[in-house]
Image (cartoon, rainbow, N blue to C red):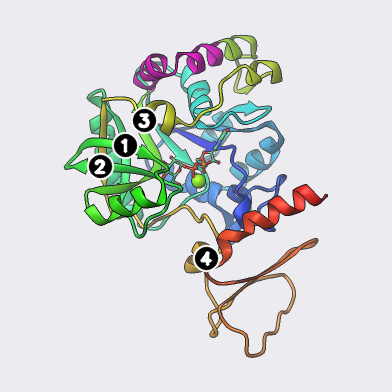
């Protein structure tokens, strides 16, 4: 199985740990490892080759972290890189990678910025997905929704059949979905044969398919594929969820309890890390003392300091927006 690791996102809600030059997936968040490294290591249990699709600016970061991971050295050496000058969202990133593969290649698409704690269940889920994908399906992975999140995709499930897929519903609809008990969160991973995905992309988003083909034809076809800026800008921007998954009728779902989190905010990160006895999450290289302070998030980096009440960390992205507009 080939693992396509998509790592072009910027994760602004984890500022100041996540920055333009050090996005969330590469920050050493858990036991001095990045989420990117943890993704590689857990997928190496069943994937024999990797393709990293990232922004060209992060090539050395990805390469170094790949080198420092606990992966087999031959796999590290053979890893393919698709380097984007700018991101055009996940549909183009995945399409560019699939266009370099054989139609029959079995693919697992993994976001690089998620945490999965139950490896045994995860391996079982991927094994089942591979069986369904072998039969010509595109497989999504459902996890039980914990609340009415509007930033996720929702899968309406009947056994392994998908009744419908809705990306990022509004708050009211998300609430109704969770209430109904029939919907699961889309965890953002996908399993399919490369040719099947390309066929569906060509059917539902032919402009993306055509522009990706042209971009690849103009790029060097080597282990390190660098897409040109002009070609990249010609590719329409869209996610796989909106452009293909919402529209195709060959979906299957594997629902499982894999201990999934997309570590989308400091509140969700604090659920994964050790907090002090007053329920404070403090990330700093300095000695930090607190007195009668509880339920706080303190993130101290070389050039920026965040102090935030627990429960309010979704607002970090507003701070980032403000900094960008003021500077
Ligand atoms: N190479 C590349 N280029 N990677 C990208 C790009 C891009 O332009 N844009 C995003 N990515 C990577 C991100 O780094 C992340 O690992 C993954 O693709 C998903 O992108 P997000 O931007 O984080 O997507 P999302 O969170 O809005 O939604 C997706 O994930 C949710 C679960 O976390 C969807 O699949 C939802 O349906 C899903 O619920
Ligand atoms: Mg995300």
Looking at the rendering, the stretch of residues picked out in magenta corresponds to 194-213
Q: CA distance from mark 3 to mark 4?
A: 29 Å
- Residue 106, compared with residue 316, is above or below; it is above
Q: Earlier in the sequence, mark 3 or mark 4?
A: 3
Secondary element at image label 1? strand
Assess mark 3: CB under 8 A from ligand 1?
yes
- 2 or 4: mark nearer the eye: 2
**Where residue 160 sits in the image (x, y, percent)?**
19, 39
- Residue 59, compared with residue 134, is above or below; it is below
- Residue 211, compared with residue 194, is above or below; it is above
Q: Are dots 1 and 2 in contact, CB under 8 Å?
A: yes
Residue placed farthest to the bottom in the image? 292
Q: Which mark is residue 267?
A: 4
Q: Which mark is residue 156?
A: 2
Q: Are dots 2 and 3 in contact, CB under 8 Å?
A: no
Q: Earlier in the sequence, mark 3 or mark 1?
A: 1
Q: CA distance from mark 4 to mark 1?
A: 27 Å
Viewer-closest of 165 and 41: 165
* Mark 2 burial class by Cα count in 10 Å: few <14, some 14-19, many 20+: many
């Amino acid at each position: 199985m080939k693992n396509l690791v998509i790592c072009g996102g910027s994760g602004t809600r984890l500022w100041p740990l996540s920055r333009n030059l050090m996005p969330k997936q590469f920050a050493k968040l858990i036991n001095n490892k990045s989420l990117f490294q943890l993704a590689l290591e857990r997928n190496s249990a069943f994937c024999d080759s990797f393709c990293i699709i990232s922004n060209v600016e992060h090539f050395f970061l990805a390469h170094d972290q790949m080198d420092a991971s606990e992966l087999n050295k031959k796999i590290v050496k053979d890893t393919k890189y698709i380097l984007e000058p700018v991101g055009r969202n996940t549909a183009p990133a995945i399409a560019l990678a699939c266009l370099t593969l054989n139609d029959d290649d079995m693919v697992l698409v993994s976001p690089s910025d998620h945490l999965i704690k139950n490896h045994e269940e995860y391996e079982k889920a991927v094994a089942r997905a591979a069986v369904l994908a072998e039969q010509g399906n595109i497989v999504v992975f459902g996890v039980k929704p914990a609340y009415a999140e509007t930033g996720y995709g929702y899968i309406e499930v009947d056994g392994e059949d998908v009744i419908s897929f809705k990306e990022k519903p509004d708050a009211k609809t998300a609430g109704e979905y969770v209430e109904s008990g029939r919907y699961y969160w889309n965890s953002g991973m996908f399993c399919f044969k490369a040719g099947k995905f390309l066929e569906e992309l060509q059917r539902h988003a032919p402009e993306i398919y055509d522009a990706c083909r042209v971009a690849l034809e103009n790029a060097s076809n080597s282990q390190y594929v660098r897409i040109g800026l002009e070609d990249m800008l010609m590719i329409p921007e869209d996610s796989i969820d909106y452009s293909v998954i919402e529209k195709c009728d060959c979906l299957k779902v594997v629902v499982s309890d894999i201990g999934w989190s997309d570590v989308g905010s400091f509140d969700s990160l604090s659920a994964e890390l050790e907090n002090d006895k007053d329920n404070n999450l403090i990330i700093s290289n300095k000695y930090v003392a607190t007195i009668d302070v509880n339920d706080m998030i303190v993130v101290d980096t070389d050039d920026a300091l965040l102090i935030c009440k627990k429960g309010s960390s979704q607002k970090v992205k507003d701070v980032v927006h403000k900094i960008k507009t003021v500077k």
